[in-house]
Amino acid sequence: MCNRARTREDPPTLFERFGVNWLADRPLDNRFNPAELYPRSRAWIIREDERGRGADVMSWDVLGSQAAWPMTNVRNLAQPQWKRLASDPAKRCLIPLTEFCEWTPAAIDLGDGKKPTRGEMWFALPDQPMFAVGGFWQHTAKGAGFAMVTCDPNDLIAPIHPKAMITILDPADYDLWLRGSYDDIVALQRPYATERMTVRGPVFPTRKSGGG
């Protein structure tokens, strides 16, 4: 499941793309690298409160390190703890990305005398250089944390990760995700159109051969 993603844009582009600014007078934590997202790393998110819609900074772990593994992605919104968050518009968010990664199902021999390794497959949306994934967030003992909502995979992702993909939203659905009912959220939990996505890879960034 997606535990590796990128947001290779700067705040002004983020603000223009989503029509927002910082929710606070100044962000609580802007000393991080949003270009490379890993579990428990800091990332930009878009949410709404009494001040309106704006950008915030949170950790990619909706449980705030309370579990042995980071809770970065959630599928079953009928579970009570997730239904509570999904039902509350104030706890929903958009996660801006420019691309995300899934690993090849099997390790690949690169012919370099080293152990076979799984390659990175990077997915992007040509018509949306910066797109949004549906998610939700909550306060934790270690600060605010968020998770991405997942859904069934489309035909591009299924051969690589047959269990699920992140819930990519059409811009026309941003308002519904942030303000709609619980049933609206469940209805939006669907695979993104295959023909609107591209994939590149496999790439092996830690190896000298086998890909770029």
Image: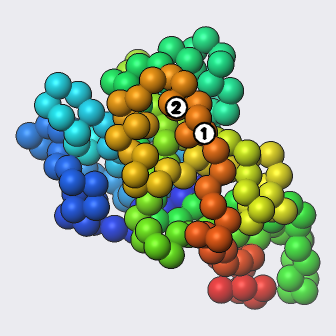
Image position, residue 114 (x, y; %): 87, 77
Residue 40 visible in the shown view: no
The residue at the point 43 percent across, 46 percent down is 173
Which is more toward the observer, 37 or 46? Answer: 46
Q: Which residue is mark 1?
A: 189
Q: Quadrant of the C terminus?
A: bottom right
Image position, residue 143 (x, y; %): 36, 27
CA distance for labels 1 and 2: 6 Å
In the figure, 147 relative to 129: above or below?
above
Callout 1, which amino acid? Gln
Residue 185, disc: 2
Count of labels shown? 2
View extreme (top): residue: 80
Q: Are marks 1 and 2 in contact (CB under 8 Å)?
A: yes
Image position, residue 84 (x, y; %): 51, 14
Assign a secondary structure to mark 1.
loop
Q: Is residue 53 left or right of residue 136?
A: left
In the figure, 169 relative to 207: above or below?
above
The residue at the point 28 percent across, 61 percent down is 17
The residue at the point 53 percent across, 69 percent down is 125
Q: Is residue 116 left or right of residue 43?
A: right
Which quadrant of the view contains residue 4?
bottom right
Which is more toward the observer, 161 or 115? Answer: 161
Which quadrant of the view contains residue 210?
bottom right
Callout 2, which amino acid? Ile
View extreme (left): residue: 25
